């Protein structure tokens, strides 16, 4: 199977790490608010697509950008990155906050987005099925809220080293810059009707952080949305389930087959 | 190192909620202490006790009385320090200064604080001093949502800027900032002392806070961190001042000392130790998560703290750890006087905030300790270098 190639792109002065694998139509994967679980589980997508996975500023191998304080700042950062990479039309798969970024990017610049996958998306206010406040979780609870299958953490140092804790602290800080005030976006539901491209809501039924019951609310607000759930998978569905990865391949590849 | 000619001794009172459940399964006495731990009847009795303590301090010849503020915690019964400042200013007559240290200025609005502090200074006839803390990490959880800890330092700096401009300008003035936008900034009343009372920032040694103090000509009060780190912070402060053509006076620098005085060193440690241990194990029972909300410190500073066992597990500190972590002076009058004097001279510091009620100490020990300090230690510190023998053996002052 292909491996990721890491390159670094200067996006308006911010060193941005971009991991790519495979050839084909561009599929941009926007990650959740953490790089520690890893992304190798996505590599089967590289058999069909050119998989492009940037690290958000302030996460993983990308540099910090303290001026990013809103989701919209990431949207504009990624439009800059697409320009820098010469990407005109792409499919976007976003996970968690990456899905929020992807949704907003498609709200602003929908003609650029062919197909959109929102996997366990963060940010919609659903009082009946509220998102758990990540920042309120005790340190020893977080792993269990993110995944049901604890083997996804088997590469973590045990016990955790100060260096590993510092890596988590840095990413927690970057997440807090955009997400400390509240874990929902007051305006998102107002504009989701602009997502006119084919859109898949993909969710693990065992997601303890953002309940899969939110999927139907998203689907009602998005004109051309379908919902697919992955039985048992938690919030880190792509690390836990190859079925989740296959669902992305099926949905994004469907148009090609038509 | 400047010579320390004069050491000012302030009585620093924490207003703990004294009802210790040492062996309970309470995970944290900050941010999330179970609400049913609080009994308002007990609280009322404790406010009365703390006021007795303040009135006693007022008779004991301190240079000042100092209070501070914390939120969601048994550590402090004063989440609104301006309120308590008003109570103290109107219930004391002998003590020259009252220091409110203080409202984290970015957790309120700076114009409101300019008004409150101006009002207090006018009411007290110019007896107030103020210190601005960034607030512990815990304050950002307790006020979560209002201030993003990743922005806390920038917002703090802008808040200081606004408050000082508001006090100095003949208003109204306009202020267009990153965090606050005022069309008509114009606090009434303005402070009694001109241009404004003596001000400090409270810091833990970070360069940003040191620079803030120098930029705005504020004094610097160091929190309870290991002594070498305190000394480094003061040295850094003098260096930064010199680079900018300014000067730091010993009167601009404050250390905090936890202190217990008895006839002998052994007796002092025997009487104080259980309460100091409770101070750490109960009143300062805080999981690391609450100490460092995301972005409250830089990643490199986080790594430094996570790598230092004494800091990473502060609430499980041994006696030796505690004595190593900060300034704890327990002993005979001569021991305590010598220790405090040495610390001031080593650090070039002219002000000491002395904590004399420790943890869950019973009131009789507080009273005894305060009297011993005032009658036996203060004269020794004040007479040092003057070859004066200490003959001050005033009557013990009791509780009124």
Image (tube, coloured by chain):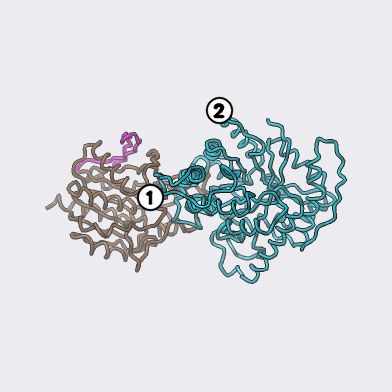
Q: Residue B266's x, y, as percent?
A: 83, 51
Return the residue at label 2.
B243
Q: Residue furthest bottom?
A: B41
Q: CA distance from mark 1 to mark 2?
A: 36 Å
- Chain painted cyan: B
How packed mark 1 is, by other alpha carbons closer than 10 Å (few <14, some 14-19, many 20 or more), is many
- Write the start and end of the magenta stretch as one range: A1-24
- Chain painted brown: A
Q: Nearer the viewer, residue B66 or B336?
A: B66
How packed mark 2 is, by other alpha carbons closer than 10 Å (few <14, some 14-19, many 20 or more), is few
Return the residue at label 1.
A178
Q: Is residue B373 above or below residue A15?
A: below
Q: Residue B159's x, y, as percent?
A: 48, 46
- The residue lying at 81 percent from left, 43 percent from top is B380
Locate residue A10: give its quadrant: top left
Q: At numbered mark 1, what does the secondary structure look like: helix, strand or loop? A: helix
Q: Residue A183's x, y, as percent?
A: 38, 57
């Amino acid at each position: 199977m292909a491996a990721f190639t890491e390159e670094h792109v200067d996006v308006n002065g911010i060193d941005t790490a971009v991991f790519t694998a495979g050839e084909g139509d561009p599929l941009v994967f926007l990650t959740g608010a953490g790089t520690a679980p890893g992304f190798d589980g996505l590599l089967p997508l590289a058999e069909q697509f050119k998989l492009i996975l940037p690290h958000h500023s302030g996460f993983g191998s990308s540099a910090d950008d303290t001026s990013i304080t809103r989701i919209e700042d990431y949207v504009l950062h990624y439009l800059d990155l697409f320009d820098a990479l010469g990407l005109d039309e792409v499919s976007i798969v976003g996970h968690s906050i990456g899905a929020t970024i992807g949704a907003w990017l498609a709200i602003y610049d929908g003609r650029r987005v062919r197909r959109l996958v929102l996997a366990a998306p963060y940010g919609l206010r659903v009082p009946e099925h509220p998102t758990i406040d990540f920042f309120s979780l005790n340190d020893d609870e977080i792993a269990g809220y993110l995944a049901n299958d604890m083997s996804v953490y088997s590469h973590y140092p045990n016990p955790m080293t100060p260096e590993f804790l510092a890596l988590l602290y840095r990413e927690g800080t970057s997440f807090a810059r955009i997400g400390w005030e509240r874990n929902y976006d007051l305006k998102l539901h107002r504009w989701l009707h602009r997502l006119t491209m084919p859109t898949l809501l993909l969710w693990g039924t065992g997601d303890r952080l953002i309940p899969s019951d939110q999927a139907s609310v998203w689907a009602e607000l998005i004109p051309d949305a379908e919902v697919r759930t992955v039985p048992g998978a938690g919030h880190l569905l792509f690390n836990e389930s190859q079925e989740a990865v296959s669902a992305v391949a099926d949905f994004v590849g469907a148009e090609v087959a038509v | 190192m400047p010579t320390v000619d004069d050491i000012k001794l302030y009585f620093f009172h924490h207003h703990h909620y004294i009802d210790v459940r040492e062996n309970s399964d309470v995970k944290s006495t900050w941010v999330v202490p179970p609400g049913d731990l609080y009994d308002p009847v007990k609280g009322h009795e404790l406010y009365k006790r703390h006021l007795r303590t303040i009135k006693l301090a007022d008779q004991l010849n301190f240079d000042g009385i100092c209070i501070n503020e914390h939120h969601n915690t048994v550590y402090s019964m004063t989440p609104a320090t301006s309120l308590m400042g008003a109570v103290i200013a109107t219930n004391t007559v002998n003590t020259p200064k009252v220091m409110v240290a203080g409202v984290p200025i970015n957790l309120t609005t700076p114009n409101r604080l300019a008004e409150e502090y101006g009002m207090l200074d006018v009411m007290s006839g110019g007896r107030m001093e103020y210190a601005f803390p960034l607030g512990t990490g815990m304050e950002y959880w307790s006020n979560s949502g209002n201030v993003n800890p990743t922005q806390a330092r920038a917002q703090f700096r802008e808040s200081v800027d606004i408050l000082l401009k508001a006090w100095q300008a003949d208003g109204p003035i306009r202020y267009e900032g990153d965090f606050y936008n005022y069309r008509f900034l114009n606090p009434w009343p303005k402070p009694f002392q001109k241009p404004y009372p003596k001000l400090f920032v409270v810091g833990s040694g970070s360069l940003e806070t040191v620079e803030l103090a120098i930029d705005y000509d504020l004094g610097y009060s160091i929190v309870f961190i290991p002594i070498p780190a305190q000394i480094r912070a003061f040295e850094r402060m003098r260096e930064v001042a010199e680079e900018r053509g300014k000067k730091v006076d010993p009167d601009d620098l404050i250390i905090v000392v936890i202190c217990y005085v008895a006839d002998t060193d052994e007796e002092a440690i025997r009487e104080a130790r259980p309460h100091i241990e409770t101070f750490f194990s109960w009143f300062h029972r805080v999981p690391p998560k609450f100490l460092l909300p995301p972005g409250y410190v830089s990643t490199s500073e986080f790594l430094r703290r996570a790598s230092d066992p004494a800091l990473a597990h502060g609430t499980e500190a041994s006696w030796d750890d505690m004595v190593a972590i900060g300034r704890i002076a327990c002993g005979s009058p001569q021991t305590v006087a010598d220790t405090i004097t040495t610390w001031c001279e080593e650090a070039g510091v002219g002000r000491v905030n002395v904590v004399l009620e420790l943890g869950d100490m019973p009131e009789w020990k507080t009273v005894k300790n305060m009297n011993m300090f005032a009658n036996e230690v203060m004269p020794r510190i004040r007479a040092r270098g003057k070859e004066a023998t200490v003959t001050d053996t005033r009557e013990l002052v009791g509780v009124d």
